Structure formats: C-alpha cells, structure tokens
Image (cartoon, rainbow, N blue to C red):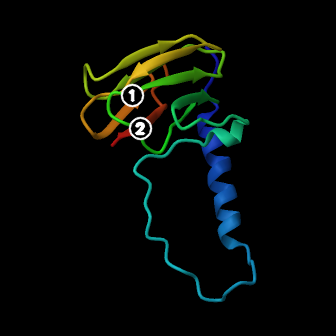
Amino acid sequence: MKPSTAPFLASVFVAVCALAACSDDGASSTPSPDTTMPTTMTMPAAATGTAAAPDEIVIAGFAFSVPATVSPGDRITIRNDDTAEHTVTSDVAGAFDVEIAGGETATLTVPSTPGTYGFHCTYHPTMHAGLVVG
C-alpha cells in the first residue's frame, strides 16, 4: 500500500500560510481581524494543479476539492485525478455513497434537503470534506 502524502502536504500548506502571514505588504501597520472560520479543511486542488468547477468534486493528491455550495437535487460530477480508487461517502448513512476508480469520473445526486453533509473516503480515513447544499 502506498503511504498517504496528505500529512506532508498539510504541513507544507501550514508552513506556506505561516510565511504569508508574516510577510509585510507595506499597506498598513495595523492588522485587520479575520472573522471567517472554515467549517472543514481540505488541501486545495490548486496545490496539485487541479481545480474544481462549480458543479464538481475533484479528488487529487488524496484530498477533496468541493464547490462552495450546490443546489438541492443537483447532479454533480466527481472527478478522481488520483490513480487510487476512492469513495465519496456521506458521514450520515444512506445520504450518498459513490465509488470512483482512479482516473475516472462518476455522478453524485445531491441530497434534496439543504444543509452541510460531511463525507469521507472509506478507503483512506484521512480524507474528509463537507458538501454545502443550499
């Protein structure tokens, strides 16, 4: 089994964010407060050179990239850019469960009830994200 690179990529992501936060752009000496808190954290697809369209979930580098929101009942594409097989499995049993072979695509029908649906890959326990249906 190939070891996951997610912990390494997460460390790199944190280091880059820390360096960016310490940089001086010369605009102001008074920092502005950041009042936004992410509800889930995944490695952005840009780190692997892949971007998700507004109506798709992309799996790349053993991480999910999800759209900001999707509409209830929509059909969205799941694109697996990894060579490993993955799943998009709702944390709530029965909401959705889609298996995607490496390099393939699949379709997910979004739940019809608005809310945030946490999901994971059943094969790779470190892979988690959330789908906001609104």
Q: Quadrant of residue 70?
A: top left
Q: Quadrant of the C terminus?
A: top left
Q: Check disc 1 and report the residue beneath it.
A: 74
Identify the mark at residue 49; answer none if there is no mark: none
Residue 8: give x, y in percent of width and height: 65, 40
Q: Could you tell me which residue is drawn at 54 percent across and 38 percent down? A: 54
Judging by the rendered image, the residue that carries numbered circle 2 is: 70
Q: How crowded is the residue under tag 2: few (<14 C-alpha within 10 Å), some, or many (20+)? A: many
Res. 121 image quadrant: top left
* Nearest to the observer: residue 76 or residue 1: 76
Q: Position of residue 28 (x, y in %)?
A: 67, 87
Residue 62 in sight in this render:
no
Residue 105 visible from this viewpoint = yes
Name the residue at the bottom extreme: 29
Q: Are marks 1 and 2 in contact (CB under 8 Å)?
A: yes
Q: Considering depth in this image, is 7 or 83 the residue closer to the camera? A: 83
Point out residue 73 in the picture as x, y percentages from the top left corner.
33, 27
Horizontally, residue 34 falls left or right of residue 52, namely left
* Direction from residue 97 to residue 55 in the image, left or right: right
Q: SS for tag 2?
A: loop
Other-residue count near label 1 (Cα within 10 Å), few / some / many at <14 / 14–19 / ≥20 = some
Q: CA distance from mark 1 to mark 2?
A: 7 Å
